[in-house]
Amino acid sequence: MKANRRPDLSVEIAGLKLKNPVLAASGTFGYGTEYGPLARAAEFGAVITKTVTLAPRTGNRPPRICETASGMLNSIGLANVGIEQFLSHKLPALKKTGATVIANIAGNTVEEYVMLARRVNQHPGVAALELNISCPNVKQGGIAFGTDPKAAADLTRAVRRAWPKPLIVKLSPNVSDITPIARAAELAGADALSLINTLYGMAIDIERQRPVLGNVTGGLSGPAIKPVALYHVHKAYQAVKIPLIGLGGISNGHDAVEFMLAGAAAVQIGTANFCDPSSADRTVRGLSDYCIKHGIGKVSQLTGRLKCV
Amino acid sequence: MTHSITAQVGSNREVSPQIYRMALKLPQRKITGQPGQFVHLRLLQGTTASILRRPFSIHRLTSGRLWLLYQVKGTVTRAMASLTPSDSVELMVPLGNGYRINRSRQEHLLVAGGMGLAPMLFMADHLKKVGLKHRILFGCRSSSYLLPAPTGCRVASDDGSCGVRGPVTCLLEAEFSRCNNAAVYACGPWPMLRATASLCRRYKVPCQVSLESFMACGVGACQGCAIRAADGEYLTVCNQGPVFDAELIDWTQEHTV
């Protein structure tokens, strides 16, 4: 391969320059260092941290995960070390890897999200914030903001005032139409949208006649949800002008190209990190190969290239 | 250091009904492991329906070979059973923390329930190598679940069809009445581990247990394999375990795998 034929894989999202469009999805790459040499944080365009809350959370009652056909259910329950421990210990270790860091935050109230944004803003190490308004596994907050356009807008507007850097809002697929929420977040000042978070789901142990998950229900992820995720990206791309970051069942270059064609400016690898820690590396190479094959000089030219007629 | 490797199947034999022993050829000699550590396995010719890896204790490890002992229970283990020496699997190896040998004790009792025998041959090899006195106590449902174990292994079965009738803790209690300076290392089903932990506490014998859990990442990133600790917090089986001091675990919880 000639060097001059190698495509430019860098993308820019809301002023944030990323060396490639493949990001680690929140909750699947911990605080960025757990995989050690098996998956290096710096190989991703950016690492989105596990959701951080104000106080530490121990998480939900086990079992917390379960495999389902071409996917998995989880009900982790936002187990995390809390913002102070995150900033003092986890963030410096992740920064040391050279990775671009996007912090994912969640609160029970608008005020909690704002406090988190302010606190993160006191540290220079975080390049962007992703608001988790779509976690299906906690009683308060989370998805309550992600299924109502007004609540999503109010929250986004409030955090926008407290956070000067790129602001990403992560949307839930557990709505009949994602576009009103997408538009509400855009109007309230979001710089980009991540979609989708997990779908509500459950599994039952028929011998014990009990739910498999300790939390009864959970969130479905993995290849099983890819068509649903693509659908929502496709719909949202027609509804908003801000960049979209697509996720849901992506594990290789083929999947990533599909999302970009549907309108995503970047993608996230989630469940595939569990199946194969080298998924991101493979996805980046697959994107590059596709661009070469199709004579595309810049990966960002793929975004929204889908021809429906 | 943990490696991600592709390993070719050396052999794969049914050693007891529905229980197989698989030898994998290691491509790198530098792969090391401790008894109690595990591998996270993925089938190369995987079905698209099953996406997650499966954790297995290291059954035995020599330079160049790694053995697994597994029971056919679901789609992945069924597919594993059909692998032949031309096939390969992917492994993350080694993962987790193994058993810590308690050198202040004179005798080392390896208590295995059913498939819990898997890490104990590796442990026995290791104890033998360092010259420590040890014995395997093996409990199973019946003689059809009997697994090949080294000579000197004591056996108990629920129906008395092999060894003494009763739970493996009967054998353990007999050992305690004979020796008051033992350390216990256990692996097996949750109720058996709970009974072992309880007996050890009663006799004030240090006990380490190897736990099993549904697992996704295997490295402490997802928090999916959590189990409740005695202090009410959660522990991740993959990277804080799978071997824990029995005292750390909340044995009142129900734990299913």
Image: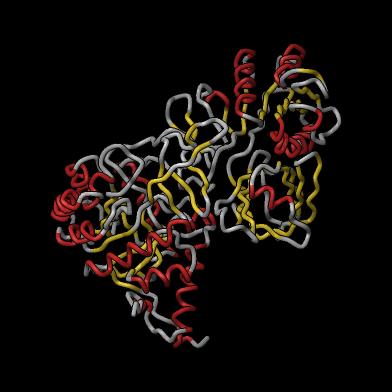
Q: Tell me: residue A7, above or below residue A124.
A: below
Residue B134 visible to the viewer: no
What is the basis of the colouring in this image?
Answer: secondary structure
Q: At 69% from the left edge and 52% from the top edge, which residue is drawn?
A: B79
Question: Is A308 situated left or right of A240 in this image?
Answer: right
Q: Tell me: residue B61, above or below residue B195.
A: below
Residue found at the far right of this picture: B151
Residue found at the far front of this picture: A309
Q: Nearer the viewer, residue B174 or B2?
A: B174
Q: At 17% from the left edge and 42% from the top edge, which residue is drawn?
A: A111
Q: Tell me: residue B64, above or below residue B166.
A: below
Residue B46 in the image: state x and y as whole percent. 62, 58
Q: At 74% from the left edge and 54% from the top edge, which residue is drawn?
A: B82
Number of numbered discs present? 0
Residue B155 visible to the viewer: yes
Residue A146 in the image: state x and y as whole percent. 25, 50
Q: Give residue B156's quadrant in the image.
A: top right
Q: Nearer the viewer, residue A97 or B247?
A: B247
Q: Nearer the viewer, residue A75 or B185?
A: A75
Q: Quadrant of the C terminus of chain B?
A: top right
Q: At 61% from the left edge and 45% from the top edge, which residue is drawn?
A: B55
Q: Nearer the viewer, residue A76 or B47?
A: B47
Question: Is A305 situated left or right of A146 in this image?
Answer: right
Residue B172 in the image: state x and y as whole percent. 72, 19
Residue B65 in the image: state x and y as whole percent. 76, 52
